[in-house]
Amino acid sequence: MTDAKLLPSDLRAWAQRQVGPITAVRDVSHPRPGSRVWELRLGGRPGVFVKVASGVVAYQRESLAYRHAVPALGPEAAPQLIESSARHLGPLLTAVPGRPLAGLDVSRAERYEAYRQGGVLLDRLHAAGDMRGEHRVGAEEALRRAAHGVEKHLAAASDRVSAAARRFVRRLAGDLLLLGPLPLRFLHGDAWERNLIWSGRTSWVDFERAASGPVSRTSFPLAVLALSLVRSLRALPVTAPTPDGKPTTPANVPALAEPGAPHQQEGDKL
């Protein structure tokens, strides 16, 4: 949590009109600029959360996700939208049990299971979104925007990225423009451990970056986490691609293809 942010009085008044008397407020924002999230305690009733989105686009994405796709995950697999306020850029959300996996000291087997369940839930989310009309057009443009935006990110990275790594990134960006059609789905957009809530069951939170796009955009973060865990579990000598583009060792493939690996297998169930 960052230095405590105060819940704006007008936002508190709006939230209270939706859920009744608020007895206590706790700042639970992520330790990053722009994160503004509060837990609202309601006496003997289950608590709720209210947040202020980082901008209008983020608010619109999150509202769309909570109204049209997130309900497919179920009430304990993601927060449910109580109400939203365009004026405050604020969704009011139910709580889910557990804590972010990123801050938990759990066994390897337990972390493996959290990833597996997370992959199953993301697959449900992918299938739940509307991929018609403008949503499909936006998804088809996502790779082109990513490729053309690479220079902005390299500039922001400054001298933290070597010349060899810059050449490698630019080559990959060029490859994006040559790819044929990819599977398009509705994506979480920020599927990292900080947004994976674990209580013995997995839940996903924070849908500010949810949007339609190539399914690989969500699969990649989870695959990175899973590969790290698989390496530890199986002690495989897997080598990541180098900035010069040298391939990984063949051990990379069986590690991820092993039955029961953290990415979803056909027929997986929670």
Image (cartoon, rainbow, N blue to C red):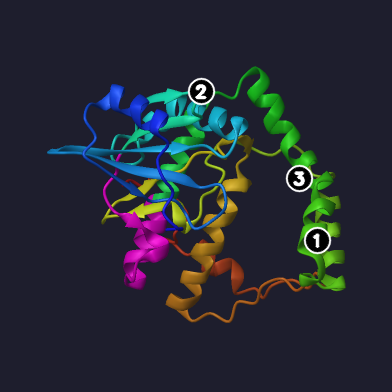
Please state the horizontal and vertical placement of residue 88, each as a whole percent of the image.
Answer: 49, 28
Placement of 81 over or under 24, stated as above or below? above
| Secondary structure of residue under mark 2 | loop
Task: Give the crowd class for mark 1: few <14, some 14-19, many >=20 residues within 10 Å.
Answer: many
Start-end of magenta stretch? 95-117
Instruction: From the image, tell me which residue sits under label 2.
Output: 86
Distance CA(mark 1)–CA(mark 2): 38 Å
> What residue is at 84 percent from the left and 53 percent from the top?
151
> What residue is at 56 percent from the left and 50 percent from the top?
219
Instruction: From the image, tell me which residue sits under label 1.
Output: 169
Instruction: From the image, tell me which residue sits under label 3.
Output: 146
Placement of 243 over or under 64, stated as above or below? below
Q: Tell which circle, 3 or 1, labels the residue nearer the N-terminal end.
A: 3
Write down the quadrant of residue 130 in the picture.
Answer: top right
Please state the horizontal and vertical placement of residue 230, each as a whole percent of the image.
Answer: 47, 71
Please state the horizontal and vertical placement of residue 251, each as a whole percent of the image.
Answer: 60, 74
Q: Between 48 and 75, which is closer to the camera in this rendering?
A: 48
